[in-house]
Image (tube, coloured by chain):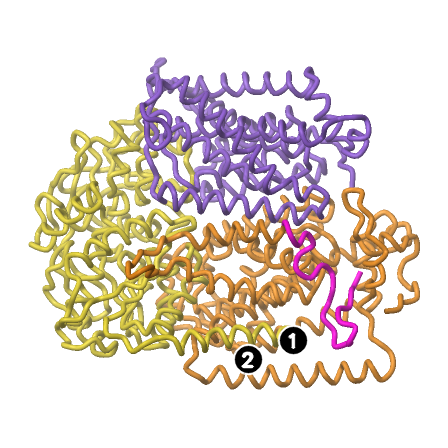
């Protein structure tokens, strides 16, 4: 019983982390219909920026307290995301979708290799802030404090994203563009501005994900975005790409299934990553647009 | 169009060839993953190689020039890179790669072009198997697996062990397999075998399985990023077993990332900076600290040893001709390298002593030396 | 350029024929004039151009043959890699560019082809030596075949796998198709990592006979191009293109969309299997990591930069990719400025490569060749819808 509870704690922590990254992924997808391969790398950028601000390396002359450092990193990453969209994606807005996809791959490779040249390929340790590393013992149960923080942050992020997308004026414009960009433009929506904002928001979410990821795994490296990028992609598709709630659900589902698979079939644990894709394929066969997705316009 | 492209490439190739001058320096090709998913390993090896070159810039009164070529952690590129340095730069030998799979791709070029290759740290037994021109600076997994298993039985009095291996790394799979063989032979029991893949960061579901019946030792055969992470998450789950690891765990990052969780972790490695077995090892540690302002690591030391082995072979042969270097490398015995006294055996594997170190107060501390 | 008579499926307008309707922009009439089909020309012009083609193939064959014997092994190696990329890219283009199905699967097919052929060509002694973790499963421990049957088996296995996965894969479309195919690619890689008795797991296979030569690869490239262009000129090719332009319309016109998608997938898989096997016997080793999704990304970059749907583009893109990344190495070499030597910066090449990739896409939105094909006609480019 304890073991199962322990695995549930693992599940909660991993699932909400995946969900957190997937929300940002799906947001950009929903508006631009672009598989943003660079999302994971923006996440990496956010994590590095947070580290630099925290430790006073490169960016800031003095080490900043963590709330300030994290807020700064999120803001800077949002700006970087806006810049990325302006430089690499906007000029291609009317180009074939695959061309846009290649620039996304190009942007991803650029960020990774830039990271390697500028920050070095070796991992850097990410400091523990606010003693989040602590583990609380509840009987036989070990609960890392961080395992409670991550779901909290995810819930908060999800709430904020929901509010923006479904309650704010910008969100209304986002949804309009997502449905039909041409018509939205004709109706007077400033599509460029809204898409910029969406990218900023998506990148800010990536930075939040990157910071939580680094806190949990205590390190950053230039390729740290690849794995979260793929998992978020899978989670977003699983939930129905473009759907915010779907992405969160997909993240939980993916994290949960991974944990349960290893827990119940440890001898097969080598197939853990294959399982994620098997589930994905199975779900897409039953529901070709994901759990909460809608039919996409061609 | 196809023809034009081919012709253009041909012209470029010829133009480049015409431009090269007869080498005065001794050119040595270095093929490493400076970018791509194992960029960290390439970088570490290169750091050690640079120190080695500064320590011994000349042999036979000729300067050694290292021609570094990045293979972006890609096997196809590794083979192309090897062709490039051999044909275009006319190197006398190739140093590289870290990953065994890429070392094997380079090996096919080395064999065909009859240029000796020394892999700094590819421990997979297959790398040198049946090859004439391929050597390595590291010991192979079978020896290291034995060392760790014997240490677990003799020193830690372990009866039960769990092996945690990275199935995507040949190094890790091999080491785990050889550890198992010896440990079982010595009367130990492997209670569970857990698996992960490079890049995985969450190991808690696997580790949770050990909570009900914690083993005496947990053997992590992967690299330092994951080893640190596994130790951290195991301690987070309240597991108190002793951790054992191979040379892949040796890097300052193990402690930086792992923090208190890696205290008391034992690992086998090639050398110890405080009790280096050779004078060269001592000098290397000092030079490394001076140049890079950080503690030396295992991969860097092996990179340096690949360099010193080559330099030693050139000196012994009295010539920088590839064929003579090859013969000299084959006869290398009792060579005092950075990571110990090196002997190349008939199968081109390297025999040298292993050192067991542990983490104490955030520092690597010498525990024991094991001879082959 | 004359438009071919509309023997293809009806229900398509001429503007959608060009495939240029995207983001609401319609192709200008000027581009329209260039649109043609993969269709043999009539009359003496056709004869001349065919003769040109045969002669130039023979000349290139001779050139590749002569080069193989020389000391220029670096050049030969780069060209061989480029040629193999071209086999992989043109066949990949068939699914992504011609049929318009966004698949991310070539790594899976190449891996299957490479492993199948490698297991068949390895000598029993080599196998006994290599499989140090677990012995290889019988009967493979004793089988050894020459290169050609092994290559065909590699292609055949990949094609068989394509049939198997095509069934689920083509139930989804668009980006969902992309992720499902990416998933199958990853699954193949993970199975290869775990099925130690067949693949030797992460340790990989080595000691393959170095059968792949520039000439051999070149012959396979010609075979690939002949088969694919032949198919493109047939009704099958028109059906493929009609699916790309408008799947609903194609279906309404009575085309069995699923069957045609599957056939494109299978033909493509066969050549990707062959390409993987050629690559394996060039490098003489195979391991699971070799076929990760970066392998697919490289091919995707090749076909999109070359021009999606253009076979010429795929071939040129392949050589640009193989040769270009070598030429870019200049930026990492030590340079001497005003008597001072500066050390090269490792990794800079890839930074520039990725920046270049973005720049190319910004200026050539449809890739270098669009959908145009090379031809001998004096008018120059021949377009293909």
Residue under mark 2: which chain is it in?
Answer: C
From the image, tell me which residue sits under label 2.
Answer: C215
Identify the residue at image location x=53%, y=38%: A229
Q: Residue at x 17, y 74 (%)?
A: B328
Instruction: Give the number of callouts.
Output: 2
Q: Which mark is residue C222?
A: 1
Q: Is residue C364 magenta?
A: yes
Quadrant location of the N terminus of chain C? bottom right
Chain that is orange in the image: C
Extreme top residue here? Answer: A138
Q: In the rendered view, does C6 fall on the left or right side of B346? A: right
Badge 2 and badge 1 in a common chain: yes
Q: Percent x, y for residue B354?
A: 16, 51
The kind of secondary structure element at disc 1 is helix
| Stretch in magenta | C362-385
SS majority, magenta: loop
Alpha-carbon span between mark 2 and mark 1? 11 Å
Residue C43, visible in the rendered structure: yes
Q: Is residue C156 visible?
A: no
Q: Colour of chain A?
A: purple
Relative to C172, say whether B65 is above or below. below
**Residue B299 on image: x %, y %:** 26, 50
Q: Is residue B363 above or below residue B236?
A: below
Label 1 neighbourhood size at 10 Å, few (<14), some (14-19), many (20+)?
some
Residue C269 point in image, percent of width and height:
64, 61
Instruction: Judge by depth and name the residue closer to the eye, B28 or C257.
Output: B28
Q: B368 left or right of C181?
A: left
């Amino acid at each position: 019983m304890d073991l199962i509870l322990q695995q549930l704690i693992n599940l909660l922590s991993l699932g909400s982390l995946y969900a957190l990254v997937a929300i940002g992924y799906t947001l950009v997808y929903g508006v631009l219909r672009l598989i943003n391969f660079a999302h994971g790398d923006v996440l990496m950028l956010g994590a590095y920026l947070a580290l630099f601000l925290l430790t006073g390396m490169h960016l800031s002359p003095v080490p900043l307290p963590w709330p300030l450092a994290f807020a700064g990193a999120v803001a800077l990453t949002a700006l970087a995301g806006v810049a990325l969209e302006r430089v690499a994606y906007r000029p291609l807005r009317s180009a074939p979708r695959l061309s846009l996809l290649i620039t996304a791959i190009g942007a991803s490779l650029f960020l990774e290799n830039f990271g390697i040249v500028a920050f070095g390929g070796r991992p850097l340790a990410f400091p523990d802030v606010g003693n989040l590393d602590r583990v609380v013992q509840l009987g036989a149960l070990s609960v890392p404090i961080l395992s409670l923080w991550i779901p909290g942050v995810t819930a908060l992020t999800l709430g904020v994203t929901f509010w923006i997308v479904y309650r704010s004026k910008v969100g209304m414009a986002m949804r309009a563009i997502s449905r039909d960009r041409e018509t939205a433009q004709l109706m007077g929506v400033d599509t460029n501005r809204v898409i910029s904002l969406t990218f900023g928001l998506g990148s800010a979410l990536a930075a939040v994900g990157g910071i939580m990821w680094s806190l949990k795994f205590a390190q950053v490296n230039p390729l740290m975005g690849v794995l979260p990028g793929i998992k978020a992609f899978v989670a977003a598709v699983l939930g129905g790409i473009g759907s915010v709630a779907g992405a969160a659900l997909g993240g939980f589902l993916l994290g949960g299934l991974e944990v349960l698979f290893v827990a119940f079939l440890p001898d097969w644990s080598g197939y853990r990553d294959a399982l994620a894709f098997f589930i994905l394929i199975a779900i897409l066969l039953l529901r070709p647009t994901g759990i909460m997705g809608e039919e996409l316009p061609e | 169009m196809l023809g034009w492209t081919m012709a253009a490439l041909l012209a470029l190739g010829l133009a480049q060839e015409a431009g090269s001058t007869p080498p005065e320096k001794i050119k040595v090709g270095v093929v490493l993953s400076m970018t791509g998913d194992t960029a960290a390993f390439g970088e570490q090896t290169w750091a050690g190689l640079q120190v080695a070159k500064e320590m011994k810039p000349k042999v036979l009164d000729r300067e050694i020039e290292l021609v570094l070529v990045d293979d972006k952690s890609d096997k196809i590129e590794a083979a192309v890179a090897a062709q490039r340095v051999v044909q275009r730069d006319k190197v006398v030998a190739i140093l590289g790669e870290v990953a065994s799979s890429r070392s094997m791709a380079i090996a096919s070029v080395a064999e065909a072009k009859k240029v000796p290759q020394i892999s700094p740290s590819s421990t997979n037994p297959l790398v040198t198997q049946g090859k004439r021109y391929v050597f390595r600076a590291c010991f192979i997994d079978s020896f290291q697996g034995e060392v760790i298993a014997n240490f677990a039985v003799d020193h830690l009095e372990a009866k039960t062990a769990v092996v945690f291996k990275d199935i995507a790394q040949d190094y890790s799979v091999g080491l785990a397999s050889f550890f198992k063989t010896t440990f079982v032979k010595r009367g130990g029991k492997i209670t569970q075998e857990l698996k992960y893949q490079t890049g995985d960061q969450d190991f808690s579901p696997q580790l949770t399985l050990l909570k009900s019946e914690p083993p005496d030792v947990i053997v992590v055969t992967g690299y330092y990023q994951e080893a640190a992470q596994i130790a951290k998450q195991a301690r987070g789950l309240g597991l108190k077993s002793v951790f054992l690891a191979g040379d892949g765990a040796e890097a300052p990052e193990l402690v930086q990332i792992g923090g208190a969780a890696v205290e008391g972790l034992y690992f086998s490695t090639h050398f110890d900076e405080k009790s280096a077995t050779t004078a060269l090892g001592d000098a290397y540690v000092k030079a490394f600290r001076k140049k890079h302002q950080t503690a030396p690591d295992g991969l860097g030391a092996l990179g340096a040893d690949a360099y010193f082995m080559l330099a030693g072979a050139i000196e012994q042969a009295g010539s920088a001709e590839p064929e003579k270097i090859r013969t000299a490398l084959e006869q290398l015995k009792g060579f005092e390298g950075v990571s110990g006294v090196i002997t190349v055996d008939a199968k081109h594997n390297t025999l040298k002593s292993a050192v067991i170190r542990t983490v104490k107060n955030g520092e690597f501390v010498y525990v024991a030396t094991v001879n082959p | 350029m004359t438009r071919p008579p509309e023997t293809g499926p009806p229900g398509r307008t001429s503007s959608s024929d060009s495939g240029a309707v995207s983001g609401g922009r319609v192709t200008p009439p000027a581009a329209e004039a260039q649109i043609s089909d993969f269709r043999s020309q009539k009359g003496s012009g056709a004869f001349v151009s065919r003769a040109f083609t045969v002669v130039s193939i023979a000349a290139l064959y001779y050139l590749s043959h002569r080069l193989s014997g020389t000391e220029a092994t670096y050049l030969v190696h780069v060209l061989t890699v480029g040629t193999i990329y071209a086999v992989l890219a043109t066949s990949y283009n068939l699914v992504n560019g011609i049929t318009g199905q966004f698949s991310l699967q070539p790594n899976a097919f190449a891996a299957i082809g490479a492993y199948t052929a490698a297991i068949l060509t390895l000598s029993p002694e080599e196998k006994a030596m290599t499989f140090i973790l677990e012995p290889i499963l019988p009967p493979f421990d004793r089988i050894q075949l020459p290169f050609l049957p092994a290559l065909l088996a590699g292609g055949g296995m990949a094609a068989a796998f394509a049939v198997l996965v095509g069934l689920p894969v083509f139930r989804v479309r668009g980006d969902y198709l992309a992720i499902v195919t990416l998933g199958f690619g990853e699954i193949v890689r993970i199975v290869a990592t775990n099925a130690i008795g067949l693949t030797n797991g992460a340790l990989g296979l080595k000691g393959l006979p170095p059968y792949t030569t520039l000439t051999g690869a070149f012959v396979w490239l010609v075979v690939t191009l002949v088969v694919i262009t032949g198919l493109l000129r047939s009704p099958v090719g028109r059906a493929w293109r009609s699916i790309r332009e408008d799947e609903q319309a194609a279906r309404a016109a009575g085309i069995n969309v699923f069957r045609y998608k599957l056939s494109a997938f299978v033909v493509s898989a066969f050549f990707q299997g062959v390409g993987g096997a050629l690559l394996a016997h060039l490098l003489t080793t195979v391991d699971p990591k070799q076929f990760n999704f970066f392998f697919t990304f490289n091919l995707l970059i090749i076909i999109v930069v070359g021009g999606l749907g253009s076979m010429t583009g795929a071939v040129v893109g392949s050589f640009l990719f193989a040769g270009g990344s070598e030429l870019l190495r200049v930026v990492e070499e030590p340079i001497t400025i005003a008597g001072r030597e500066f050390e090269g910066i490792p990794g800079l090449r890839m930074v520039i490569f990725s920046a270049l990739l973005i720049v190319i896409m910004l200026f050539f939105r449809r890739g270098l060749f669009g959908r145009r094909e090379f031809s001998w006609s004096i008018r120059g480019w021949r377009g293909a819808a």
